Image (spheres, coloured by chain):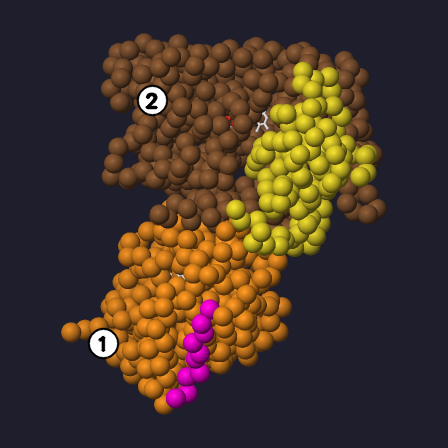
Chain colours: A brown, B orange, C yellow
Amino acid sequence: MTKSSVPDTQGDSQYDLIIIGAGPAGMAAASTAAREGLTVALMDEQCSVGGQIYRAIQHTALQYQQILGADYYAGQTLLAAFEQQLNAEQSQITYLPNSMVWSVEDDLVVSFSSGEISHRLRAKKVLLATGAMERPVAFPGWTLPGVMTCGAAQILLKQSALAPAAPLVLAGSGPLLLLIAAQLNRAGVAITAVLDTTPKGRYLKAAKYLWGALKNPILLKKGLGLLQELKKSGIRYERQVSDLKAIACEQGIQLEQVQFSVSGKVQQIDCNSLLVHQGVVPNVQLSRALGLAHQWQALQQCWSPVRDTWGQSSHADIFIAGDGGGIAGAVAAECQGQLAALKIAEQLERINPQVLVQQTRPIQRILAKQLSIRPFLDQLYQPAEAFLKPLGDTIVCRCEEISADQIRKIAAQGVAGPNQAKAFCRAGMGPCQGRMCGLTVANLIADEQNRTVEAVGYYQIRSPIKPLTLSELADLAD
Amino acid sequence: MGLSGNHNQAEICVIGGGVVGLSVALGLIRNGHQVCVLDESDLAFRASRGNFGLVWVQGKGDSLAQYAQISRRSARLWQPLAKRLQADTGIDIQLQQKGGLFFCLTEAELQARKQMLSQMQVAVGGDYPFEVLDLQQLRELEPEAGPEVAGATWFPEDGHLNPLLFFRALTDSFLKQGGQIIHSGTVSDIRALTQGFQIQTSQNGLWQCQKVVLCAGLGNQILAPMLGLNAPVVPNRGQVLISERVKPFLTYPTGHVRQTGEGTVQIGDSKEDVGFDSGTRIEVMAKIANRARKMYPILNRVRLVRAWGALRVMTPDGYPIYQQSEVHRNAYLVTCHSGITLGALHEGPIADWISQGSTDLPLEVFNDQRFKL
Amino acid sequence: MTNVSNFKRLPSRHDASVTVFVEGQAVQVQAHDSAAAAILAAGLGHSRTTPITGSGRAPYCMMGVCFECLVEIDGQANTQGCMTLVREGMQIKRQQQARLLTDSQHD
Ligand SMILES: Cc1cc2nc3c(=O)[nH]c(=O)nc-3n(C[C@H](O)[C@H](O)[C@H](O)COP(=O)(O)OP(=O)(O)OC[C@H]3O[C@@H](n4cnc5c(N)ncnc54)[C@H](O)[C@@H]3O)c2cc1C
Ligand SMILES: Cc1cc2nc3c(=O)[nH]c(=O)nc-3n(C[C@H](O)[C@H](O)[C@H](O)COP(=O)(O)OP(=O)(O)OC[C@H]3O[C@@H](n4cnc5c(N)ncnc54)[C@H](O)[C@@H]3O)c2cc1C
Ligand code: FES
């Protein structure tokens, strides 16, 4: 594709299905849909397929497979199925890497940017498979160079075989924290400490969901296995850590120390790298910009777009699969991708309803098993209040450098909600468009006004959902 | 039935918490009243949150000299208001009134604009200090003006401000002086009592007040008839683009592009009759971007970080309505399109008029009966 | 360049065969590295200063959502380093506060 193609909005669709995101959900959906004879365009802003879990699966940098482990290389099976469809003689799949989708409109026109040139395509159905992002949690010092997310470090491992500078500390809560600590450890990276911020009493609270979790004993065992792996290797592991703070060197330009408390005792560890993690939340930027219905997930403390068991959203022709619709992990994402693709094939009359039922039953069984453990994990690893509701001069909006106090002050005055707060203090107006502060701002307003986060609501997101050059947009005018 | 104790009460209720409502409300506090603003929730239509921030005079009132007159009066009242807001709240609303430019991309456009401004000059007896600049003269003011630009008109009284900081400063100042802002949800009914009014809100029960001022933007259309007033306002969508922060490179605001105090470049804006839809459309945004790069080719590589659509509050002739109800003398209607430009007028003489019942402003022409056949 | 903070290369299946320039200094990187990875490998420390207070920032999420990795790449300001693959000869510079618009950048 060389020229910006502006589809005639009255005219034909170029594809049966456009899939946005080539992680497990998107890849599985593309393979399935193509197999059923649908023409598919698969777009991803990354340069290769895999999404977050299977990042760089086509060209993993690390020499030794045991570092990332079997769950990562399982992506090769998915990749093989996808490549088979993609490279088939009369392939139904157009794969568009380096294609950042910045708008999806009601009429199913998808606009995307590739090499700073924008194109527009239209489909009969659209599947959002845009995945999750790590929950942005504000704590003192989180903007310092030297602090990054665990997921970021993992991406560097997978794609570049790069390991963070020592001394290294990991802090946070959740299965991914343990996984990434274990992966770094296996890679021979020295970890000075793992600071687990899972608050006291969470195991007790989560226990009521244990029944569901036991339906998936393998997953449960994996989690415990990671913990043991870390302990065995003698890494200092602190529990019930609170008051996490990244402290800068004298010049203020680089991380030098992490400070925290355990049972009221304040401690410091010198470090050059601090990796943080507090779980993952759906990346709702596109579904929000589309104005789809969203619901508040109390256990996961995040918003997710409403979807039925097939993944159909509040817009009849727009489906959602994978973690972008609610966190359930890679295997579930793959199942959801398949289910959505099959349902779409049925709606476009490529398969009949009986075949749909036959084909989907086994997938649904696998999915159910994956979903059964989520309430347990969600309750266990729900971030501690202090991370959701920061205090004082802690930066909340990284782009515009707006502190918790500034937002609290506006909230205490009775601001109507996050959008009015944004107008009043610029939180959410920078290039990340509120991705990093949206949940926190809503939490702070809720805290100050004694309302629920659900009632407070979220930013109104508009396309383009990522920055574009002016010329790129203007070029679409003719 | 008089005022009873069982309800929320205020001396004056202002319905609508946009910049028009808050400007009037602040002026009423200055006049010593006890004022409560009733407003909707976070996601309501709010022109005040989506506008372009121009304090604009040139070309305003080309078919109504009184409109030109009140716009200029407001522009003159702006500096003292901005100073007062800063003293009150510490917020600098970034007001600049160094003059403004209106770019014309074709010679025909430039000639037509020249003719319009000349006629306005004649209509006010000469005191209308505009200038017409060709591209070369324009480049002395704005060196980045592009080769496709035919020229511009210049007016020394034009300016701009940060409309969100203005909104915030109004809010802070009003609250600080004891005003109340209630997110009451939608006002669905207003009833005249023997004395005063009773107001039904969707989330905050009933309110009673002695005086009521309608400043509900597009909501005025439904509310006005309840008080014997007429506000046939309709939405007109404007889409605006905004860039990343860049080092200062523009000196003057123009009708379509201005650099804000933060360094972002604000690029506007469309005029679309699309009903109650404040969304963005790519075709329209592309046109806006295309015009902007003709004005300033240097903008080609700037990154746009946000875009939005907002609904203007338009009367059929585009001019404001300032009306005291003939039926219920303590009910007023204030609605307009240019609520930023007219902000200082609203906080000043308009609020004084509502407080004191008289004014030297030529308000007769802004009556609400003009839309009735 | 302070090197306390640089990321270390682990045994890799790829060669560091691409040369990029980080703040003018040649750095050998791998073809699948992003510009943000190159910055971290070079131990640049902060890779941008904010337009507001000028405080130093470095890549945070590596997946395109935080916009902390904004750098100047081959003259184009405020480019997301984590979303840009390296190319031979690529010039990567710190984004110093608000960018300066220049017309030479337009093709
Ligand atoms: C940083 C990170 C690391 C993770 N690591 C692991 C792990 O090691 N193990 C594990 O079990 N789980 C991991 N997860 C959890 C992960 O969410 C799921 O395992 C799984 O990747 C979800 O699959 P998905 O297909 O729903 O989305 P993803 O795998 O996240 O794929 C979504 C894809 O959509 C693309 N995309 C998003 N928005 C756009 C857009 N606007 N335009 C174009 N493309 C777009 C992204 O580039 C991405 O490739 C991780 C999550 C994150 C955020
Ligand atoms: C794109 C665009 C660019 C603009 N540029 C400029 C400019 O450069 N200069 C300028 O001077 N003007 C400009 N304007 C116009 C300016 O923004 C408006 O004149 C001004 O904001 C109107 O303010 P308002 O308070 O009347 O309306 P709004 O901001 O719409 O506020 C109305 C308020 O009333 C509330 N409300 C409505 N109905 C009810 C009800 N039944 N009960 C309770 N509350 C209710 C709403 O919730 C809302 O808060 C622009 C407008 C747009 C859209
Ligand atoms: S590091 Fe977060 S966007 Fe690049």
Asked whether the viewer can see residue B243, the reply is: yes
Q: Secondary structure at mark 2?
A: loop
Query: Residue at image x 69%, y 24%?
Result: C17
Residue A256 pos. (x, y %): 81, 38
* Disc 2 C-beta below 8 A from ligand 1: no
Query: Would residue B186 appear left or right of A402 to someone viewing this image?
Result: left
Q: Residues within 10 Å of mark 1 (few under 14, many from 20)?
A: few
Q: Residue B247 falls in which quadrant of the image?
A: bottom right
Q: In the image shown, does A157 or B122 lie closer to the viewer? A: B122
Please give the residue where the numbered disc 2 appears in the rendered image.
A39
Residue A269 pos. (x, y %): 82, 33
Q: Are marks 2 and 1 in contact (CB under 8 Å)?
A: no
Q: Secondary structure at mark 1?
A: helix
Q: Which mark is residue B370?
A: 1
| Chain where mark 1 sits | B
Q: Residues within 10 Å of mark 2 (few under 14, many from 20)?
A: some
Asked whether the viewer can see residue B183, the reply is: no
Residue B41 pos. (x, y %): 42, 54
Residue B101 pos. (x, y %): 46, 70
| Chain where mark 2 sits | A
Query: Residue at image x 62%, y 68%?
Result: B90
Query: Would residue C25 appear left or right of A104 to someone viewing this image?
Result: right
| Magenta span of residues | B126-135
Q: How many labels sit on residues?
A: 2
